[in-house]
Image (cartoon, rainbow, N blue to C red):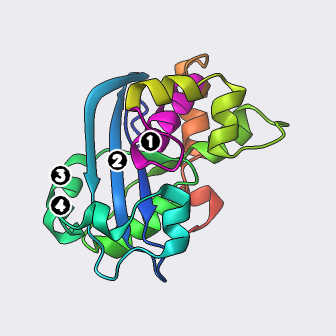
Amino acid sequence: MGIDIERFWVIDVEGSGGSPPEIVELAMLQIDRLVLTDNKRHWFVRPEHGIKPAATRIHGLTDDDVIGSPDIADIADDIITWIEDTPIAGHNVKIEVDILKRSIPDWRPKSAIDTLKLAKILRPGLPSYGLANLGVEFGLANEAANRTGAKHHSALYDATLTALLMIHLLSPLTPDERRKAVEEANIFDPRQGSLL
């Protein structure tokens, strides 16, 4: 059975900067039939080992910002409940998959669609495929900011921009073209060999 191309959970995480990194912020938004729904989850997460200054310079979060937040074990069951049987998507999604699998060992993703790869497949030849650059290229950055009140390197903003990007890329396609593109952008596609 192929990938469900109607429903996705778009995920973004921000990390602690440790080695390996721990989740300090997690956002999940649902796309249903190429519409970004109001169904979303967003958590700040208290890491076991604290947030490194280099990570704070990127996303702005400090230990004080997450001191009263749950740790990942407190929300793991909720995360699995939402994403267990639905494809996930993210920009350079391998990062999200790696950190989630390390943080929630019981989670076994069935498919993970990489919007970075999707953009390269559907829009070859762009000068940059970074999320912020694609947001500007396709005029999506302001909408993501307006929807979230946040900026790049906030998990909620990045997940929102990724969802808008995915919708933008897939909307012009026929269902067959959409299925083919999504399957090609799945990092678990057996035709590509294991990426994990």
Q: Are marks 1 and 2 in contact (CB under 8 Å)?
A: yes
Residue ID for mark 2: 27
Tell me the kind of residue under disc 3.
Thr
Residue ID for mark 3: 81
Spatial distance from mark 4 to mark 3, Cα to Cα? 10 Å
Spatial distance from mark 3 to mark 2, Cα to Cα? 14 Å
Q: Are marks 4 and 3 in contact (CB under 8 Å)?
A: no
Secondary structure state at the residue bearing disc 1:
helix
Which sits earlier in the primary sequence, circle 1 or circle 2?
2
Is 88 one of the magenta-colored residues? no
Residue 82 is situated, as x and y percent measured from the top left of the image, at: 22, 47
Which sits earlier in the primary sequence, circle 2 or circle 4?
2
Tell me the kind of residue under disc 1.
Ala
Left or right of 73, for residue 139:
right
Tell me the kind of residue under disc 4.
Ile
Spatial distance from mark 1 to mark 2, Cα to Cα? 6 Å
Q: Which mark is residue 75?
A: 4
The main secondary structure of the magenta stretch is: helix
Secondary structure state at the residue bearing disc 4:
helix
Q: Residues within 10 Å of mark 1 (few under 14, many from 20)?
A: many
